[in-house]
Image (spheres, rainbow, N blue to C red):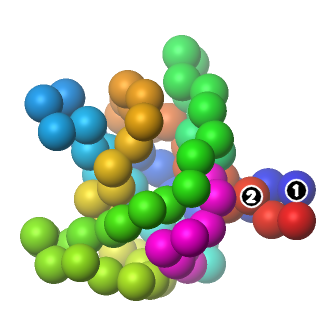
Amino acid sequence: MEKEIGVVTHYFTHIKVGVVEITKNSLKVGDSIHIKGATSDFTQKVASMQIEQEKIEEAKKGKSIGLKVKEHVREHDKVFKVTE
């Protein structure tokens, strides 16, 4: 099962980091996410997150976070939290 929790607002190609705005609920290190867009569609575990170069364990609604991603993501890609 999946719940939409955010949207990609930017992607840094050289460091493979997506900026995700959390629009609902929260996201924690260790959670599994599914990123889906026009050309993106993959699932990964959240290994680490940052807000302005500070490592964080959890991001709540309203925050924009930097997230290392295994594939290229694009602006407006939706981010879903995968739940068992």
* Disc on res. 1: 1
Tell me residue 20's x, y (percent).
Answer: 38, 55
- Specify the quadrant of the image occupied by residue 40: top right
Q: Amino acid at mark 2?
A: Val
Q: Secondary structure at mark 1?
A: loop
Instruction: Count neighbours of disc 1 (C-alpha within 10 A) and say few if under 14, some if 14 to 19, many if 20 or more.
Output: few
Residue under the point 64% across and 58% down: 32
- Specify the quadrant of the image occupied by residue 83: bottom right
In the rendered image, the quadrant that contains the N terminus is: bottom right
Tell me residue 62's x, y (percent).
Answer: 40, 76
Name which of mark 2 and mark 1 comes first in the sequence.
Answer: 1
Q: Secondary structure at mark 2?
A: strand
| Left or right: 82 in relation to 56 | right
Residue under the point 61% across and 33% down: 42
Query: What main secondary structure does the magenta stretch of the protein show?
Result: strand
Disc 2 to disc 1: CB gap under 8 Å: yes
Q: Is residue 12 visible?
A: no
* Disc on res. 37: none
Label 2 – label 1 distance at C-alpha: 6 Å
- The residue pinned by badge 2 equals 82
| Nearer to the camera, 47 or 66 | 47
- The outermost residue toward the top is 39
In the rendered image, the quadrant that contains the C terminus is: bottom right
Residue under the point 74% across and 58% down: 82
Q: Amino acid at mark 1?
A: Met
The range drawn in magenta is 26-33
